[in-house]
Image (cartoon, helix red, strand yellow):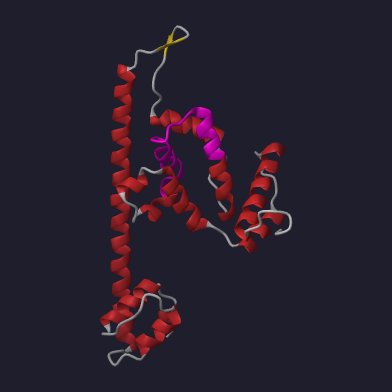
Amino acid sequence: MAFLIKSRKTDLIQLARDLDESPDPSMSKIVLRDLIISSKYYKEEEAKELLEVITAERLETEQQQKLEQQEQLTIEKLRLEIELSRNVNQSTAQNNGQTSRVKSLDEIVKMVRLLTVKVPSKSDGWDYFFSSLEKAFASENVSDEFKPKVLLCMLGDIVSNLLVNLGEEELKDYESLKQVVLKEYEPSPKICLENFRKAKRYPDETFSQFASRLTSMWLYYCKLRGANDFESV
């Protein structure tokens, strides 16, 4: 019966339905397992085979959604590049005797990347990453229209699976994208505190950057614990 517990909850729900049961999405995996086993149609080997088919179909669907999402992002990037190119050709403004021009998306991403800390490898680093990113946005005067595009370019495949269910308008909204990432990778207060205690300076990190990262980690821990003043800490 171990194969049932090792499976995804969504797959167990579908298996239960295929066995003519009526599972509730709020059920735990253990309850779903018991529901499946108690079905009058349940036979272990047949259930294994059916579950493999269900899992394969889900993975195929997720892969297709991922490809469609990546294609949509590619098209959107090309559209934006064309739009920016038109702006460049139409721009005739003068600044200190030199012709100003609109930066391309690649140029904006390159400059923002230089001013932003690396994409975090640990869950408690995302709050600091977004803080650094937004300072870079302010420094480069990145408009609200370009912020989500820059973020998607910087994160790449890291978040592709998270964006499958987002609508077109949400993909164009920086705050929506930010909250999706933070919600997915938000650590528990315990893990956040443990990482803070074990934090070490990276070889390519200055002491000032390290201090800033530590401060951000501590403030994020306090935020997760709901500690807003000295007494609550």
Q: Position of residue 156 (x, y in %)?
A: 42, 45
Give the x, y percent position of residue 1. 42, 86
Q: Position of residue 169 (x, y in %)?
A: 32, 46
Image point (51%, 56%), residue name: 185
User: Does residue 124 show up?
Assistant: yes
Q: Is residue 212 above or below residue 55?
A: above
Q: Nearer the viewer, residue 222 or 98?
A: 222
Q: Nearer the viewer, residue 45 or 9?
A: 9
Q: Quadrant of the C terminus?
A: bottom right
Answer above or below: position of 111 versus 50.
Answer: above
Magenta segment main secondary structure = helix
- Answer left or right for 152 relative to 220: left
Image height of 87 relative to 203, above or below: above
5 lies left or right of 51:
right
Residue located 34% across and 87% down the image: 44
Seen from the viewer's position, the closer of residues 146 and 30 is 146
Where on the picture, by quarter, is residue 225? bottom right
* Range covered by the magenta-colored residues: 132-157
Residue 118 is at least partly visible in this image: no
Residue at the right extreme?
Answer: 231
| Magenta span contains residue 139 | yes
Using the image as rendered, state which of residue 22 and residue 199 is in the foreground: 22
Q: Residue at x 69, y 51 (%)?
A: 199
Question: Is 106 on the left-hand or right-hand side of 77?
Answer: right
Asked whether residue 100 is drawn in magenta, I would say no
